[in-house]
């Protein structure tokens, strides 16, 4: 996901993504099947993630959470089709620019606080990097 590119699901705010982090979740054990057939879809990694339908594909299972932090919003997004990745977006009314460097540590700290129930996660990619 590049800065300015919309993410999955529908955000409550229509502000652009001015910074993002893609985090790798730990592997989960395979579910034990009691009956033959495909395994059930995975559950979201955090209880605060709520279903966030994708209007163009109702079959997709996307979950999201948004939290305001003054002039910007942190949005967590998890897609059941790619269950080992969790994306955190910073959305702000900054058009054509990135999050100011002074705000970047605050964004990272907000994401870290939201992910506390899971623990520290490795960063797969980010823009901009701290």
Image (tube, grey):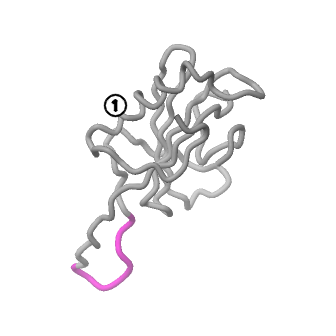
Q: Which residue ends up furthest to the right in the rendered image? A: 96
Q: In the picture provided, is 20 more to the left or to the right than 86?
A: right
- In the picture of the structure, the residue carrying the numbered disc 1 is 113
Q: Which residue ends up furthest to the bottom in the rendered image? A: 36
Residue at image location 59% in from the left, 57% down from the top: 58
As rendered, which of 127 and 29 lies closer to the eye? 127
Q: Secondary structure at mark 1?
A: helix
As rendered, which of 81 and 111 lies closer to the eye? 111
Q: Which residue ends up furthest to the top in the rendered image? A: 70
| Quarter of the view holding residue 11 | top right
Can you say whether 81 is above or below 126 in the image? below
Verify whether residue 1 appears in magenta: no
Can you say whether 59 is above or below 15 in the image? below
> What is the x, y in percent for residue 96?
78, 28
Q: Which residues are magenta?
A: 34-41
As rendered, which of 53 and 24 lies closer to the eye? 24
> What is the x, y in percent for residue 10?
60, 40
Residue at image location 60% in from the left, 48% down from the top: 8
């Amino acid at each position: 996901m590049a800065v300015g590119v919309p993410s999955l699901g529908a955000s409550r705010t229509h502000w652009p993504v001015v910074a993002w982090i893609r985090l790798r979740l730990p592997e989960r054990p395979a579910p034990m099947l009691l009956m033959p057939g495909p395994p059930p879809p995975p559950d979201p990694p955090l209880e605060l993630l709520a279903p966030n339908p994708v209007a163009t594909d109702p079959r997709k299972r996307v979950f999201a959470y948004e939290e305001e932090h003054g002039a910007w919003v942190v949005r967590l997004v998890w897609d059941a089709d790619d269950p080992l990745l969790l994306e955190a977006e910073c959305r702000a009314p900054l058009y054509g620019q990135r999050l100011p460097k002074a705000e970047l540590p605050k964004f990272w700290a907000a994401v870290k606080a939201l992910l506390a129930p899971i623990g520290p996660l490795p960063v797969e990619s980010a823009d901009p990097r701290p």
